Image (cartoon, rainbow, N blue to C red):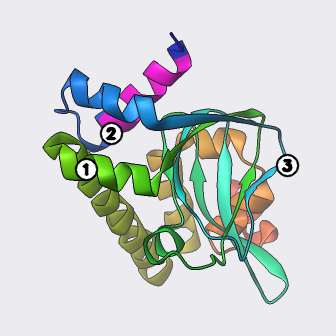
Amino acid sequence: MDTLLKETINAAVNSRYPAMNPEDRKLIEEILERKDFKKGEILLNEDQISHNILIVGKGMIRQFYYKNGKDVTEHFSYEGCIAMCIESMLKQEPTRLLIEALEDGTTYLLNYNRLTALAEASWEVNMFYRKTLEYSLIQSQVKADSWRFETARERYIHLMQAQPEVIKRAPLSHIASYLLMTPETLSRVRSGIL
């Protein structure tokens, strides 16, 4: 038995639909494909079609895109987190996002077509899928509101409270781009000047 797989699926399911029964968790486990990665590896490239939801077992990844020649971090994921390029996956069109490994690690690929087929057969899996999509949409709205309404300092404090692992483990340049700041502004925020 793959202990990391069991821990990962439990963390991911518990974060989205904790009431899911063990039998249906096992159904999801059975369709996951393990992928080990190295720091710096690109797990999904721009212009590829995303066919999978990624569940991080070990390590940290980030989703990012290029704008005006600079990369902008969209999302961080680490142990137990779920990552997906939702538009590409749902529309089966090329993505503008990239997924990069920030550390060596392991992810489990949850194939979209296999998941939706399983969701048609299992109400519990369907609820997990629905809760996963709802969570992703809510997080996108929260992030957009943060960018629109919060100061640089408020955005940093919110990230520290909501995702302390990101503050501890991600490179400062990626944290700055995620918060829509320059590295210099992030440095001032961290030192308490702003």
**Residue at x 68% of width, y 67% of height:** 64
Tell me the CA gap for discs 2 and 3: 27 Å
Residue that label 2 marks? 15
Residue marked by disc 1: 119
Instruction: Tell me the kind of residue under disc 2.
Output: Ser
Give the main secondary structure of the magenta stretch: helix
Q: Is residue 26 magenta?
A: no
Q: Assess disc 3: are there few (<14), some (14-19) or many (≥20) residues with their C-alpha within 10 Å of its C-alpha.
A: few
Q: Residue at x 76, y 46 (%)?
A: 102
Q: Which residues are magenta?
A: 4-13
Q: Is residue 106 above or below residue 126?
A: above
- Residue at 83% x, 49% y: name it: 41
Query: Which of 152 and 64 lies nearest the eye of the viewer?
Result: 64
Distance between the alpha carbons at the discs numbered 1 and 3? 34 Å
* Residue 155 sits above or below residue 31 on the image: below
Instruction: Please tell me which of labels 1 and 3 falls first in the chain.
Output: 3
Amino acid under disc 3: Gly
> Which of the 4 quarters of the picture holds residue 156?
bottom right
Q: Which residue, as the protein is rendered here, is positioned at the far bottom?
A: 68
Image position, residue 33 (x, y; %): 57, 36
**Relative to 187, residue 39 above or below:** above
In the rendered view, tell whether residue 177 sits above or below residue 102.
below
